[in-house]
Image: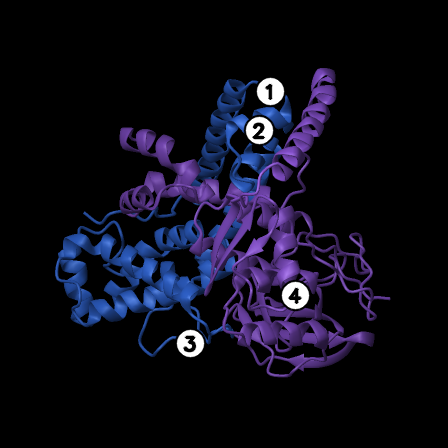
Chain colours: A purple, B blue
Amino acid sequence: MTDCTVTLIDRCLERYIQGTLPDSEARTFEEHYFDCPACLAQVEALQAVAHQLGSQPQKHRRAPIPWPVRVAVPTAIAAGLVLAFVGYHSSNKPVQEANAAELRDGNLKLSLDKSGQLHGADGLPEKERDALQAALTTGRLEADLPSNLAASKAETMLGASAATPLFKVSSPVDRVVSDDRPTFKWVSMRGASGYRVRVYAGGYRKVAESPVLHELSWQSPVALARGENYTWTVTASSSTGEVRTPAPPQPEAVFQVMGSGPAKDIESALRGPANDHLLLAVLYAKAGAVDEARAELDRLAAENPNSPVIAQLKASLDQATPSPIKTKAAQ
Amino acid sequence: MSVNSSDIRGSWTSDSVMDNDRLVQAIQDGDREAEHAFVERYLRPVKAMLLARSRNPDLAADVLQDVMMDAITALRRGQLREPAKLSSFVIGIARNRLNNHYRSSVRQPESLEFPDLLPDSSSNAEKMETQERETLAMDAISGLDPIDKTILQMTLVDGLKPGVIAQRLSLNPDVVRQRKLRATRRVIEFVRRQSQSENPHHHVVGKVT
């Protein structure tokens, strides 16, 4: 490690990975590590660590609240409420509330004042306004799994082999997808000359099959039925034969195509003039399409760098990631 | 068709004696090996940059292809006047591509077809390296003290400051800072060293001198 990396890495790396480094400093750091192998290696290493940490369950310990605080805080809150009530009623002047949260969101400028009132979304239907207000107030997105999905983390295929898989599927796995022609992605297998994707409906009925592919993704040309669960596999060909993944005893790669109702709501929001990423994130999350919800939050984050409420929403989405889906085929 | 760029190194490898002027000129002259050398040199830093700015691996992977295509196309057309600023030129293209993606109102998945005669940047070897790095990261994390792991998780994933973490974990903020620094250095060094030992012939893409 050279001196330059010690200084720059210590100053920039962590905030750069967090996305909290000011843009001008981020640009300077990028100009440096594009030509500095040592710093690039450290950026990549910490990105891999952050990615792995993000995919692991969080077990944050909360500090125990000391006894005096347990007594004093509720007392202070009660006193504050009384004073606020008296103050409000003793004054005829309107109370100008400062904004508790403010977001630029597509063509909207949303703000939540300290009384929890949402501003800037007047053109939206009441139901959607309420959803936005709830998300901004709680800092949470609720990811609901449809009732016909049974979560089962331990769902594995029957079979003998316990060898480490040579390659694996990436997405969609245990997800609701909004597109009825989903795009399937997988990681490469060393030495593979081609791949073939097969998609199955209930009862292991094959509904789509790709030609031999040389890329690591494929979009189904066939529209899959909305609200239905599917499994899929990839078979890699190499000079030593064919390898399929997932294979026993790995869990099946299961996904559901979003139902018609939520899909219509999202389609309508997409066609609307607001270009409202937060609303789309709420709708995607509600339909269980966590990946799409996260993508909308990323777009929102790009418009609002360093927004704490977006970081909270993302964290809530990570915690609410749906459990694996059990299919009719697997039952 | 994916082409493993590490398999097609010719005279234009990153450790060749070659400066930006020659590389840029060679690409403008239609030298395919120079284009592959360009992809090999910039694939990883561009990917790291896109990932840092988007925090979305799928999006970064998709935009990466477009950035490499845009850069090579622009270099072929002689649009870079000052070869010394090649890295800044690539960074600018990457930033614009990402911004355009966010501004785009088209939400359908984009078709990522390479035009003819452009080197494919979707190298399987590179993907395999990323996969290996992820596995090493997992190993590095599993070797951490549980509190250090929690501190790193709260820092890198939740974006929390040491003061807040200290409050949540009932620790002194200075202790959190020290543990965070120590854990960060430990995991980075682990991934970096293991990565080098697993890929002894691996080129760390750097400045061509």
Disc 3 to disc 4: CB gap under 8 Å: no
Disc 2 to disc 1: CB gap under 8 Å: yes
Residues tagged by mark 3 and mark 2 found on one chain of the structure: yes
Which residue has dot 2 on it? B165
Q: Secondary structure at mark 3?
A: loop
Q: Earlier in the sequence, mark 1 or mark 3?
A: 3
Q: Is residue B178 left or right of residue A176?
A: left
Q: Nearer the viewer, mark 4 or mark 2?
A: 4
Label 1: chain letter = B
Which residue has dot 4 on it? A126
Cα distance between the residues tagged 4 and 2:
38 Å
Which of the numbered marks, if any, corresponds to residue B171?
A: 1
Cα distance between the residues tagged 1 and 4:
44 Å
Which residue has dot 3 on it? B113
Residue A96 x/y as whole percent: 51, 44
**Residue B90 sits in quarter:** bottom left
Which of the numbered marks, if any, corresponds to residue A145?
A: none
Q: Secondary structure at mark 2?
A: helix
Tell which of A290 and A221 is nearer to you.
A290
Q: Which part of the image, by quadrant, shows the N terminus of chain B?
A: bottom left
**Which amino acid type is marked by label 2?**
Ile
Q: Secondary structure at mark 1?
A: loop
User: Which residue sits furthest right?
Assistant: A331
Q: Earlier in the sequence, mark 3 or mark 2?
A: 3
